[in-house]
């Protein structure tokens, strides 16, 4: 082992040690940003410095903004346009946006890790400000007046004596080919006209009126429909199938088989589905029982070989006090996109264009080029919006399916959509995990000792490597499985948020990275952060109880970060924490985290009532406070936090991928239940703690950890029992109450 | 050959009578709003209204729509001229990815048509067959409440004529 990183966290005196993990590839979750900055430019400008890679102005004054990030339903398009409009001083309606396209936009890696506004928003902000400066400079040259006498407004440069030149008249071919400079003349917050405002999202009108809003809605001329037949289990081999009988069906164009990869192309979608079912009926497979015992998953995970690293070592172990310990487990969780994965591919002239809702069109292109044995420039990947993905769902795999099937019918676009059972069985799940915390609290309410250990498989199995794609493992000459990636601290993977933000004098955190993957897994919102925050915040609650202190007071005592304290206090105040009084059978829970210890701060208070007969939890009220630095769109922030709270409530109360020793068995919504309206909270409030002078912080994954933990703490409060094995189902609560 | 009245217009259907209505709407008529979600009637993304009742179009053979009034989200307005329910969803910014929303809106449309005074509890109960994975439910409930409030004076007035 070699020491690869050594950093002293300012203020806490903590020494963070991370060790290189043998053959695991060092990688960040966005696939970007590893290593020193190249040019010292802000955000993604550092990788792609030319201004016209981000902003283009047409002769008619219409502005095109380009981003390598993708709209995933998080409102990114609107946020980026707000940023561009503000700095360009151009009306929002004159701006259009091009998103992730290997043929047109910058390579910004994956749209992941709550990085998009930081990376792309920062780049666009500075590029737009510098374009404005260039346009003003050009106007100064033409008008023969100093630039200081000119100002930009409403898509034009205005000067003395009523002079006005529109951007379209100022722009020249060469003007915006300049490279960005390190410094930009940014608009002061006090002058904002569109930034920081709750601008309505540009994508919503089409979505609520039946417009063509999704990849599923694209219908290029000559479109064919295809379906794949996935094996019944991991590693199953296709022994035989009656392809000829299916190929004779009316409307079927072709059956494609390559090893175990099997699909059918048809003129119509319903025909393709019927043909898929006929193929599946005649297919014979050889299966292997390779899965662990689902009932003992945590033990199975901890028994796997691990690569261990101590990611925090502070003070001395063994501080005396009342000891609280708990081992927290989560099952595999499904992303559960409501729209199964879909892709369209078309082969022309020995190359292929693929429309995909992948989170990373550039890494997908590399993977597809490898799979198809083509040079990168023969593959173009264009992002088209799908249903919300919440991490890596089947998007990339469906893109590979479409590319392979379309190769059999060159010249015609082929659309593949997965069936529900395929998405539920084959998507790369959020991995099962175990986190164990042992802590001690002194009689005067100080945490004297803290040890946190976390066991987790990889949370980062995205393409890049062709072997990350399902089809690449199924074809007759398969690609080797992609190597498991251990994401490094400070952002972390399974160990995300495992280092407590609290200023404990004695603390130790160990990450047991599990290179083996009992079930297929990859990135799902907040990665390990959800379980680690659950473990930390549950333990904090129990420590406060042991010390006889209010849990909010107890947390504040151990927080030295003023912004953290402000968020905790805001949530408690807005909820009315101090004046709370429990309804019959009710309970209250509080939790806090700063996502990755680097992004948005979020504190959540949950009030529940409990039906002791059934163990059923009703969420009465949720109040959240969030500090996400400078806010681009406050309603967008609220929407993301509300969504994170409800999604985490669903994970916490209901969700678990089920499997026997051979197959994933939770292949529909009845076997994998998620939150329905009857379990939706009665009210959810989100309060933004404004920090207009601070940098943008990622927000989309900030609520999941604190919301899940606050709900668990409310259940502890209502039942008197600490339940540590997720999900906290009614059955488990009832069992605990009966014990 | 089946024919139905789709968003107010009589349309002949070429597809085989046992084809699920969803594929007829999307493929034959090029409509986008009704979505494939599960094909099992478990998620509600495909919901349309037939003769006033919300149905899962993914499990409804097109022959069952014979000579009946089929309404999809496209029948409630356009992005340029949204109907009151659509306006309410835009005003409440009641979507994240939005994939589940058209189905929810159609069930809400059926509810508010037959029960303009639906209570909050009734709206919640009515939406039980529908899944939203982004966690937008609070906004969806707000949008439907808003639509009900906006539509009620008009329907009351019409009833009084």
Image (spheres, coloured by chain):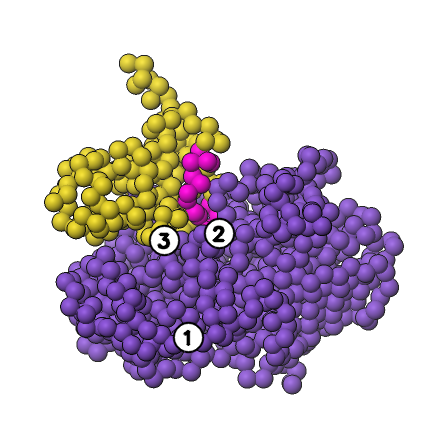
Q: In which quarter of the image is residue A287?
A: bottom left
Q: Measuring 22% from the left and 51% from the top, which residue is drawn there?
A: B19
- Local packing at callout 1 (Cα closer than 10 Å; few below 14, some 14-19, many 20+) is some
Whole-number angstrom distance, CA of label 3 to CA of label 2: 13 Å
Q: Which quadrant holds the N terminus of chain A? A: bottom right
Q: Is residue A47 left or right of residue A277?
A: right
- Name the disc covering residue A222, or none: none
Q: Locate residue A270, reporting x and y percent.
A: 23, 57
Q: What stretch is highlighted in magenta?
A: B123-136
Q: Main secondary structure of the magenta part?
A: loop
Q: Locate residue A616, reporting x and y percent.
A: 59, 43
In the rendered structure, the colour chosen for chain A is purple
Q: Locate residue B2, reporting x and y percent.
A: 15, 43
Q: In this view, does B90 lie to the left or right of A485?
A: left
Q: Does the magenta stretch include residue B125?
A: yes
Q: Which chain is yellow?
A: B
**Can see residue A283?**
yes
Q: Does the magenta stretch include residue A251?
A: no
Q: Name the residue under label 2.
A: A673
Q: Name the residue under label 3.
A: B38
Residue that protrudes farthest toward the top in the picture: B161
Chain ID, mark 1: A
- Name the disc covering residue A287, or none: 1
Find out whether the residues at labels 1 and 2 contact each other: C-beta distance under 8 Å.
no
Closest to the observer, A625 or A12: A625
Closest to the observer, A661 or A593: A661
């Amino acid at each position: 082992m070699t020491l690869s990183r050594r950093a002293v966290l300012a203020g806490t005196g903590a020494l963070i040690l991370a060790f290189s993990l043998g053959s695991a590839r060092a990688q960040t979750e966005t696939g970007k940003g590893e290593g020193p900055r190249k040019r010292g430019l802000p955000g993604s400008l550092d990788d792609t410095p030319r201004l016209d890679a981000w902003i283009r102005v047409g002769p008619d004054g219409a502005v095109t903004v380009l981003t390598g990030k993708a709209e995933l339903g998080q409102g990114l398009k609107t946020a980026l346009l707000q940023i561009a409009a503000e700095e360009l001083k151009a009306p929002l309606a004159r701006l259009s946006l091009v998103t992730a396209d290997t043929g047109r936009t910058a390579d910004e890696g994956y749209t992941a890790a709550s990085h998009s506004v930081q990376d792309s928003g920062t780049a666009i902000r500075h590029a737009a400000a510098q374009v404005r400066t260039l346009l003003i400079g050009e106007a100064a040259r033409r008008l023969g007046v100093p630039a200081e006498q000119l100002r930009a407004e409403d898509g034009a440069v205005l000067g003395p004596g009523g002079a006005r030149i529109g951007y379209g008249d100022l722009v020249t071919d060469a003007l915006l080919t300049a490279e960005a400079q390190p410094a930009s003349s940014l608009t002061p917050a006090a002058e904002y006209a569109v930034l920081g405002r709750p601008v309505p999202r540009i994508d919503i009108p089409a979505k609520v009126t039946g417009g063509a809003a999704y990849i599923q809605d694209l219908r290029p001329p000559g479109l064919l429909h295809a379906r794949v037949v996935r094996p019944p289990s991991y590693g199953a081999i296709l022994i035989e199938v009656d392809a000829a009988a299916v190929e004779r069906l009316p409307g079927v164009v072709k059956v494609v088989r390559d090893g175990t990869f099997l699909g059918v192309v048809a003129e119509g979608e319903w025909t393709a589905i019927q043909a898929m079912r006929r193929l599946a009926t005649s297919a014979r497979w050889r299966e292997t029982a390779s899965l662990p015992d689902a009932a003992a998953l945590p033990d199975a995970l901890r028994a796997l070989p691990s690569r261990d690293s101590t990611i925090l070592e502070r003070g001395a172990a063994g501080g005396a006090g009342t000891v609280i310990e708990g081992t927290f487990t989560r099952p595999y969780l499904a992303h559960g996109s409501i729209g199964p994965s879909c892709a369209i591919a078309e082969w022309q002239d020995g190359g292929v264009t693929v429309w995909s809702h992948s989170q990373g069109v550039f890494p997908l292109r590399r993977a597809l080029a490898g799979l198809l044995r083509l040079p990168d420039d023969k593959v173009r990947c264009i992002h088209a919006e799908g249903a919300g993905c919440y991490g890596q769902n089947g998007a990339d795999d469906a893109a590979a399916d479409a590319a392979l099937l379309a190769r059999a019918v060159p010249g015609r676009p082929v659309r593949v959509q997965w069936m529900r059972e395929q998405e539920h069985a084959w998507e790369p799940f959020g991995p099962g995990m175990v986190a164990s915390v042992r802590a001690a609290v002194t009689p005067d309410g100080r945490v004297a000792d803290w040890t946190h250990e976390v066991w987790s498989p990889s949370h980062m199995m995205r393409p890049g490597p062709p072997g990350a794609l399902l089809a690449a493992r199924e074809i007759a000459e398969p690609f080797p499985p992609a190597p498991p990636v251990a994401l490094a601290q400070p952002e972390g993977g399974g160990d995300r948020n495992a280092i407590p933000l609290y200023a404990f004098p004695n603390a130790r955190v160990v990450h047991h990275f599990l290179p083996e993957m009992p079930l297929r897994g990859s990135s799902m919102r907040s990665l390990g952060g959800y379980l680690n925050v659950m473990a930390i915040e549950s333990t904090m609650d129990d420590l406060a109880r042991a010390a006889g202190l209010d849990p909010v007071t107890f947390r504040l005592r151990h927080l030295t970060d003023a912004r953290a304290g402000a968020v905790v206090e805001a949530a408690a105040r807005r909820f009315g924490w101090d004046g709370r009084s429990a309804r019959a059978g009710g309970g209250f829970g509080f939790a806090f985290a700063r996502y990755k210890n680097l992004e948005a701060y979020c504190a959540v208070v949950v009030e529940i009532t409990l039906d002791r007969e059934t163990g059923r939890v009703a969420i009465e009220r949720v109040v959240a406070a969030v500090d996400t630095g400078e806010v681009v769109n406050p309603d967008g922030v609220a929407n993301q936090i509300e969504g994170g709270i409800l999604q985490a409530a669903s994970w916490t109360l209901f969700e678990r991928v089920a499997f026997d020793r051979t197959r994933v068995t939770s292949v529909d919504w009845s076997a994998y239940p998620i939150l329905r309206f009857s379990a939706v909270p009665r009210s959810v409030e989100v309060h933004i703690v404004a920090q207009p002078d601070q940098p943008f912080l990622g927000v989309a994954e900030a609520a999941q950890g604190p919301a899940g933990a606050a709900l668990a703490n409310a259940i502890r409060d209502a039942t008197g029992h600490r339940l540590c094995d997720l999900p906290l189902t009614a059955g488990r609560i009832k069992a605990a109450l009966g014990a | 050959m089946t024919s139905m009245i789709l968003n107010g217009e009589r349309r002949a259907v070429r597809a085989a009578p046992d084809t699920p209505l969803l594929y007829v709407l999307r493929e034959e008529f090029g409509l986008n709003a009704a979505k494939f979600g599960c094909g099992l009637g478990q998620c509600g993304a495909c919901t349309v209204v037939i003769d006033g009742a919300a149905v899962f179009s993914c499990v409804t053979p097109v022959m069952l729509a014979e000579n009946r009034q089929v309404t999809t989200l496209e029948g409630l307005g356009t992005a340029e001229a949204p109907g009151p329910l659509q306006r309410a969803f835009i005003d409440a910014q009641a979507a994240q990815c939005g994939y589940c929303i058209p189905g929810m809106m159609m069930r809400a449309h059926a509810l508010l048509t037959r029960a303009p005074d639906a209570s909050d509890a009734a709206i919640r109960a009515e939406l039980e067959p529908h899944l939203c994975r982004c966690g937008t439910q609070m906004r969806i409930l707000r949008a439907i409440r808003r639509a009900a409030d906006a539509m009620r004076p008009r329907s009351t007035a019409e009833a009084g004529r």
